[in-house]
Amino acid sequence: MGGPGSGYFEHEGRPGLVGGSTAGGAGLRGAHEARERARRHEQQRRLREEEERRVEEERQRTLPPETEHRIAEKLKDYEADTKESSFVFDKDGKLLWEGTEGKRGEAPNPPGKLLKNNIVVHNHPDQTAPSVNDLAVSLKSSAKEERVLTAGYQYVFRKTERFSQAKQKEIIGKVDSLYRSLRQDKSLRDAEVWHRVYTQIAKDNPGLVYHRKRVTGPET
């Protein structure tokens, strides 16, 4: 039989240690826990990378070039217009509706029945970035895309099936504090601050896609 403390296992024991196995068992448990932590860390890393990849794919998923061309051809005369105008295009870039008699700050409202799965655009004659109200409208809208047009950019909001409508109020509630935080950088133009606000909001909310595209030139 084993020595004192051996628990009568078929090997020589050590005083005070059952079977002489306590230190070895602790070491094995520690190694196992370390492997589990590493496995969970790697799993989380892969999930983050997969989410980032999906978000980037959604951001880059633009309309076909011929569709964008049709829309651009229609809008080019309104980039610097002095009146606010609104347009609805279908997925192929065909114009379905236009309202061109709006006042500054008041874009004509397109018929609700034309919004679903279509592209809605309105211009900003004062060349400002989308307002908080523009964001709120895009979150509620059934349109495929909501866009704001200026002489320099088109600002594009798009929702995918992963967007949670229940988060609308929460998203709008974060805009002001995020704007004030970014506005502290006095080197940024106001339009650039808003661009960064919407970029961050889209990053924080899966299913909400935002980007701005130059009227001529690459997207940013």
Image (cartoon, rainbow, N blue to C red):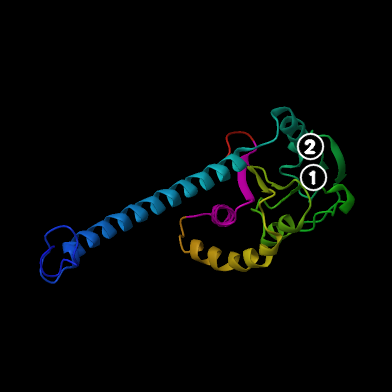
Measured along the vertical axis of the image, is residue 34 above or below residue 98? below
Residue displayed at 31% across by 55% down: 32
Residue displayed at 51% across by 46% down: 52
Residue displayed at 16% across by 66% down: 6
**Magenta segment:** 188-215
Q: Quadrant of the C terminus?
A: top right
Residue 29 screen position, x and y as percent:
28, 59
> Residue furthest toward the bottom?
16
Counting every numbered tag in the picture gives: 2
Q: Tell me the crowding category of disc 2: few under 14, some 14 to 19, or many 20 or more residues within 10 angstroms, Cα based.
A: some
The disc labelled 2 sits on which kind of residue?
Answer: Lys
Q: Quadrant of the N terminus?
A: bottom left
Residue displayed at 87% across by 47% down: 114
Residue placed most toward the observer, 8 or 165: 8
Q: SS for tag 1?
A: loop
Left or right placement of residue 22 versus residue 165 in this view: left
Q: SS for tag 2?
A: loop
| Number of the label disc, if any, that sits on residue 91 | 2
Of callouts 2 and 1, which one flags the residue occurring earlier in the amino acid sequence?
2
Question: On the image, which quarter does residue 96 sit in?
Answer: top right
Question: On the image, which quarter does residue 135 sit in?
Answer: bottom right
Left or right placement of residue 143 versus residue 101 in this view: left
Q: Label 2 to label 1, Cα distance in Å? A: 8 Å
| Number of the label disc, if any, that sits on residue 117 | 1
The disc labelled 1 sits on which kind of residue?
Answer: Asn
Is 187 one of the magenta-colored residues? no
Q: Is residue 214 visible?
A: yes
Please report contact status of discs 2 and 1: CB closer than 8 Å, yes or no.
yes
